[in-house]
Image: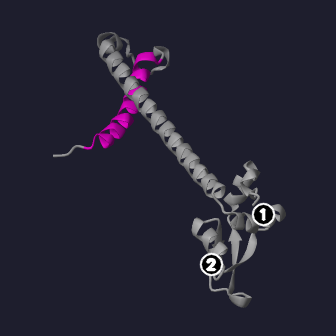
Amino acid sequence: MKVDFDILFYISARVSLALLITSSLLLFFPLEWLPFDFSEARTQYGIYLFLVFVFSASTIFSYIIKWVMESCKKLLANQAQKCAVNKMHADLLKKLSDDEKQFLSPLYEKRQNSIMISLNNPIHKRLQTAGIISQAKGTSYGSCGTFPGQVNLWVYEVLDKHPKYLTIKQK
């Protein structure tokens, strides 16, 4: 038999919150404001009410700690994933050939995003395979076997940080 403790913990957190509120009202609510006399029951059962108060407060506190830890873990995982993707993009642009750099340089200088992609051009195919340029969705067809496409926006973001990736090696 498998017991799912997460569900039990969430239920106990709700019950602990209700017990915390109830026990704190019974322990700390001023007697003058009550329409009945509760002082005898408070002195007789006060230690039990206090134990319930402490136990429910510690359960609520542990729930809050668990929530903070899970939130931090998610945030750190997202940051690590973004870092890995940015490193992969930078590596892709770092390893471009001179022909690919010559194709991207005027586009980067003009900030031109829309381009015409030729399926017969090997440079376009390599850039498309690497995910640097992408063909537009749909069945649009240009002249002479070209298709509308675009330079992905992350390319410009990486090149803004590292413009040296477009420098062409002298032969």
Q: Counting other residues with Cα less than 10 Å from the Cα at mark 2, is it few (<14), some (14-19), or many (20 or more)?
A: few
Q: Position of residue 108 (x, y in %)?
A: 78, 62
The stretch in magenta equals 4-29
* Residue 49 visible to the viewer: yes
Q: Amino acid at mark 2?
A: Lys
Location of mark 2 (residue): 137
- Tag shown at residue 78: none
Q: Compared to 24, does 124 lie above or below? A: below
Q: Position of residue 57 (x, y in %)?
A: 40, 24
Q: Amino acid at mark 1?
A: Ser
The main secondary structure of the magenta stretch is helix
Splitting the image into 4 quarters, where does residue 7 fall? top left
Secondary structure of residue under mark 1? helix
**Percent x, y of residue 126:** 61, 70
Question: Relative to 44, is 142 on the left or the right?
Answer: right
Q: Pointer 1: what residue?
A: 105
- Residue 140 placement (x, y as % from top left): 67, 86
Instruction: Look at the picture and state if 43 lies above or below 64.
Output: above
Q: Return the residue nearer the eye: 150 or 58.
A: 150
Q: Is residue 19 magenta?
A: yes
Name which quarter of the figure residue 145 lies in. Answer: bottom right
